[in-house]
Amino acid sequence: MLKIQIKKLNSLAKLPKCMTEHAAGYDLYSCNDEEIIVKSGEVVLVPTGIAISLPAGYEAQIRPRSGLAIKHQIGILNSPGTIDADYRGEIKVILFNFGKSDFVISAHTRIAQMVISRHESVDFVITDQLDETDRGSGGFGHTKH
């Protein structure tokens, strides 16, 4: 099992939690002592009160929670957000209210989920020719069937 160091930056912070045995995402909680109101059409930056130390070759992806999306039309503006292995600051979540009603974030509201993913470092090699595929240069929404 991968070990990730985590630091509480605020005594009110709640640690990320997996809600089911095989869940890929760890729920992130707001760290606020006063309610945060997200008005319709508004963007807010919500603190979690935690920072993490990821090993090289890993990232943390910050993703929306499906329950908030379907019930309250709350999403993450830059979804998925990326926490890089060399970032040591507080994890904050950029929430957007796509709905028509205000949304209230109380203390310890589950605001997002965090998925830890391995990634590769790459060297880009300039070439004059790319290998051929059936799709070729077909763009957005392109299918042959």
Image (cartoon, rainbow, N blue to C red):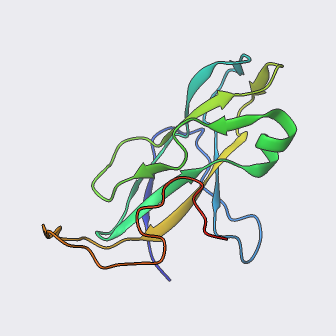
Residue lying furthest front: 144
Percent of width and height locating residue 134: 47, 77
| Location of residue 108 by image quarter | top right
Percent of width and height locating residue 14: 62, 48
Residue lying furthest bottom: 1
Residue 18, above or below 75: below
| Location of residue 123 by image quarter | bottom left
Percent of width and height locating residue 17: 66, 60
Depth check: give the residue in front, 120 or 58: 120
Q: Residue at x 71, y 33 (%)?
A: 107
How many marks the image carries: the answer is 0
Q: Residue at x 51, y 39 (%)?
A: 78
Asked whether, in this view, residue 38 is left or right of residue 144, the answer is: right
Asked whether, in this view, residue 65 is left or right of residue 121, the answer is: right
Quadrant where the C terminus sits is: bottom right
Depth check: give the residue in front, 133 or 80: 133
Q: Residue at x 56, y 35 (%)?
A: 77
Depth check: give the residue in front, 58 or 90: 58
Q: Residue at x 75, y 76 (%)?
A: 21
Percent of width and height locating residue 8: 48, 47
Residue 27, above or below 39: below
Asked whether, in this view, residue 124 is left or right of residue 132, the answer is: left
Depth check: give the residue in front, 57 or 14: 57
